[in-house]
Image (cartoon, grey):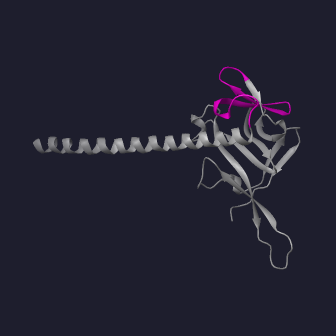
């Protein structure tokens, strides 16, 4: 009987230590995700600024006619400083599942998922920010021009395979027509 008491006392500190290590690991992952999310929103503030406010404080995005509106917790809203940067969306206008922005010929896709690993903890349910990065392919010696491949990079899920790299995606353009983005598998 004394042996089982000793064993349980020896196991308890080890179990507590293990649980503490796991809690710390989860907390570090959450901090890392929060920092990535903050950096992604800083990227949006730099390249796709709002007329007023910051993407950091947005609780939802809505497509209103041909404009993107960002709503804040106090009920106020703002559009993009350069309205032409909003080009397309997926989902419904009042709750888009994706928004496509464009600047200087490159696209950025904001993906929303309220049940996602990151989106569930974000006020606006932002799950990922995908950036289109053109990559110049070297021309063959007999060719005179280079070709450009469209490679997609994730700001929030780096190192993870992305469905965006596998297939072309069709969106609704802000004028209601079709808007297609070519997706090419990572080379």
**What quarter of the picture does the N terminus occupy?**
top left
Of residues 133 and 162, the one nearer the viewer is: 133
Question: Residue shown at 85%/75% (left/top)?
Answer: 143
Q: Is residue 115 magenta?
A: no
In percent of width and height, residue 93 lies at: 78, 32
Left or right of residue 67: residue 133: left
Question: Residue shown at 74%/60% (left/top)?
Answer: 184
Q: Which residues are magenta?
A: 49-76
Residue 103 in view of the camera: yes
Q: Is residue 66 above or below residue 143?
A: above
In percent of width and height, residue 95 lies at: 73, 32
The residue positioned farthest toward the left in the image shown: 2
Of residues 52 and 75, the one nearer the viewer is: 52
Question: Residue shown at 70%/29% (left/top)?
Answer: 53
Q: Is residue 56 magenta?
A: yes
In percent of width and height, residue 25 lies at: 42, 45
Question: Residue shown at 85%/70% (left/top)?
Answer: 145
In percent of width and height, residue 100 lies at: 77, 43
Q: Is residue 120 above or below residue 78?
A: below
């Amino acid at each position: 009987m004394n042996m089982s008491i000793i064993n349980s006392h020896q196991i308890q500190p080890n179990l507590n230590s293990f649980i503490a290590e796991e809690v710390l690991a989860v907390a570090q992952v959450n901090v890392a995700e929060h920092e990535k999310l903050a950096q992604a929103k800083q990227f949006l503030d730099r390249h796709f600024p709002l007329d007023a406010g910051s993407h950091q404080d947005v609780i939802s995005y809505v497509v209103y006619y041909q404009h993107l509106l960002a709503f804040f917790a106090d009920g106020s809203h703002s559009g993009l400083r350069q309205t032409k940067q909003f080009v397309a969306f997926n989902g419904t206008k009042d709750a888009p599942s994706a928004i496509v922005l464009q600047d200087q010929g490159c696209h950025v896709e904001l993906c929303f998922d309220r049940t996602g690993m990151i989106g569930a903890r974000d006020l606006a349910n932002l799950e990922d920010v995908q950036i289109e990065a053109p990559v110049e392919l070297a021309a063959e010696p007999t060719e005179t021009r280079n070709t450009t491949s469209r490679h997609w990079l994730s700001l929030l899920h780096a190192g993870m395979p992305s469905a965006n790299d596998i297939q072309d995606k069709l969106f609704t353009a802000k004028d209601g027509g079709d808007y297609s983005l070519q997706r090419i598998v990572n080379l």
